Amino acid sequence: MSDTARVTVFLDRDGTINREERHLSRSWMIGDKLSDVQAGRRAGSRTVLVATGYGEEHFNLPERQACVDYYVPLLREAAALIVQQETSQGKAKK
């Protein structure tokens, strides 16, 4: 998949219409099911499987290897991982 920008249109709380470009190869998909992270992989995003919910059970499925970049126990750890990855990539670009 190419790094084509996708335009997202959304409403703010005050009703303002906003447009935002998103580059899917620089995005992250976090989920507790393989179907979540498979969707992220198809979109070209990096993926994190979280152990909460179905994640621990889905981690043991063989197809996980094709779609999961990272596996973490909790959502907050996924957030910390993403911040760490984005921060280290930002330093490497300078």
Image (tube, rainbow, N blue to C red):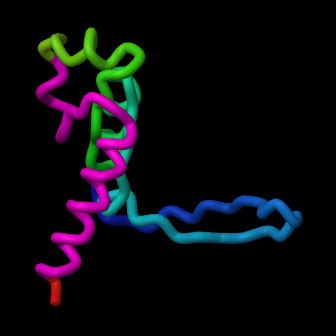
What residue sits 61% from the left and 61% below the top? Answer: 8
Tell me the chief SS of the magenta region: helix
Q: Is residue 53 left or right of residue 77?
A: right
Outermost residue, bottom side:
94
Look at the image and give the residue range highlighted in magenta: 63-92
Q: Is residue 33 left or right of residue 72?
A: right
Determine which quarter of the picture holds residue 36: top left
Q: Is residue 71 left or right of residue 11?
A: left
* Total marks placed: 0
Residue 91 position, x and y percent, is 16, 81
Q: Is residue 71 left or right of residue 62?
A: right
Of the 4 image quadrants, the one containing the C terminus is bottom left
Outermost residue, right side:
15
What residue sits 32% from the left and 65% below the top? Answer: 3
Determine which quarter of the picture holds residue 39: top left
Determine which quarter of the picture holds residue 64: top left
Q: Is residue 84 magenta?
A: yes
